[in-house]
Amino acid sequence: MIAVDTNVLVRLLTGDDSRQEAAARSLFTREPIWIAKTVLLETGWVLRSLYGLEETEIRAAFTKLLGLENVHAEDESSVAAALALTTRGIEFADALHLCSRPPGAAFVSFDKSFVQRARRAGISDISNISVKE
């Protein structure tokens, strides 16, 4: 099994360097691949921030990639749940944070808009941290 870095996924998904894309594609066709959650987080950030991809495009790319028989992700159930939450208006990184917490753990954030989106998505055990003045 081969664990891949963010730059391998970015080349594979964007094709912005034809030689590196070909090498990544070849690797993905001949080896079992393992992807860490941190690599997915960073890849999502790069695709959104540097390549201007929308959340729907990132979700589609990750879903297709993780649907390959030889590709395995760290904590696959949390990654799948996070991808599902992105259809409800939550960015992948925030969704992965929510889905990676231990069972029964409440989630808190200073980001009021994130908390509102999560509640609209059906997440009830999330709240804002109050700031005392």
Image (spheres, rainbow, N blue to C red):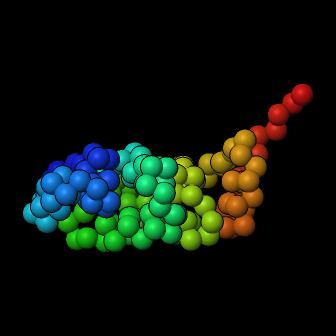
Q: Residue furthest top?
A: 133
Q: What percent of the width, then of the height, locates residue 17?
A: 23, 53
Left or right, 21 with respect to 76, comes to left
Q: What percent of the width, then of the height, locates residue 119?
A: 72, 62
Quarter of the image with the C terminus in it: top right
Left or right, 25 with respect to 7, comes to left
Q: Quadrant of residue 120?
A: bottom right
Q: Nearer the viewer, residue 19 or 28?
A: 19
Instruction: Write the residue at 47% across / 61% down.
Output: 53
Q: Nearer the viewer, residue 90 or 50?
A: 50
Q: How many marks?
A: 0
Examine the rendering and report whether any part of residue 89 can be seen.
yes
Q: What percent of the width, then of the height, locates residue 42?
A: 41, 46
Q: Nearer the viewer, residue 53 or 29?
A: 53
Q: Quadrant of residue 24?
A: bottom left
Q: Nearer the viewer, residue 75 or 103?
A: 75
| Image height of 5 relative to 24, above or below | above
Left or right, 21 with respect to 121, comes to left
| Image height of 6 relative to 60, above or below | above
Examine the rendering and report whether any part of residue 103 can be seen.
no
Instruction: Write the residue at 51% across / 63% down.
Output: 54
Q: What percent of the width, then of the height, locates residue 39?
A: 36, 47
Instruction: Write the residue at 34% across / 71% down.
Output: 64
Q: Residue furthest right?
A: 133
